[in-house]
Image: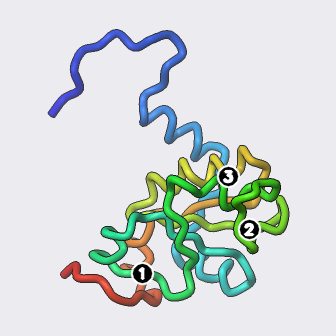
Amino acid sequence: MSAPALARPEGAWSVDELLAAARARLTRVTPLEAAARVAAGAVLVDIRPAAQRAHEGEVPGALVVERNVLEWRFDPVSDARLPVATGYDVEVVVLCSEGYTSSLAADALRSLGLTRATDVIGGFRAWAAAGLPTVGGTAP
């Protein structure tokens, strides 16, 4: 299916441009690098919706924070922040299904001042394919 021929408003970006800009501001990590960072104290945050986690499985120990509330939970000055959001130096590694939404989410955290936020290249699927620990899921 091709995109309809529309005149893009001045200043508007395509989703591909938005993603490329976000990734240009990140130092993304492989699943193995992410696992090493988590072992060294980084917070692995799974932003997938519940239905997707139920189908694909989960990473044991990952903090589940669905995408729609991520910024509120990690902004160190937000009244809705999580206890782990202790400051701007918290290392957050964001995980989604395939590594697209997580790039946008990690960039949003960086915009809040969490300069050590990043995401996992290939997302949960790459994590599982690398043989890293997962639990549950109904996907074949």
Q: Which mark is residue 42?
A: none
Side of 53 relative to 86 (left or right): left
Residue that badge 2 annotates: 91
The N terminus lies in which quarter of the figure?
top left
The C terminus lies in which quarter of the figure?
bottom left
Element at badge 2?
loop
x, y (%) of residue 111? 72, 44
Where, by quadrant of the figure, is residue 124 drawn?
bottom left
Residue that badge 3 annotates: 109
Q: Which mark is residue 58?
A: 1
Between the residue at mark 3 and the residue at mark 2, the CA separation in whole angstroms equals 10 Å
Asked if residue 19 is positioned above or below residue 62 in the image, the reply reads: above
Between the residue at mark 1 and the residue at mark 2, the CA separation in whole angstroms equals 20 Å
Which residue is pictured at 19% across the width and 29% down the height? 2
In this rendering, the label closer to the viewer, 1 or 2: 1
Tell me the amino acid under the disc marked 3: Leu
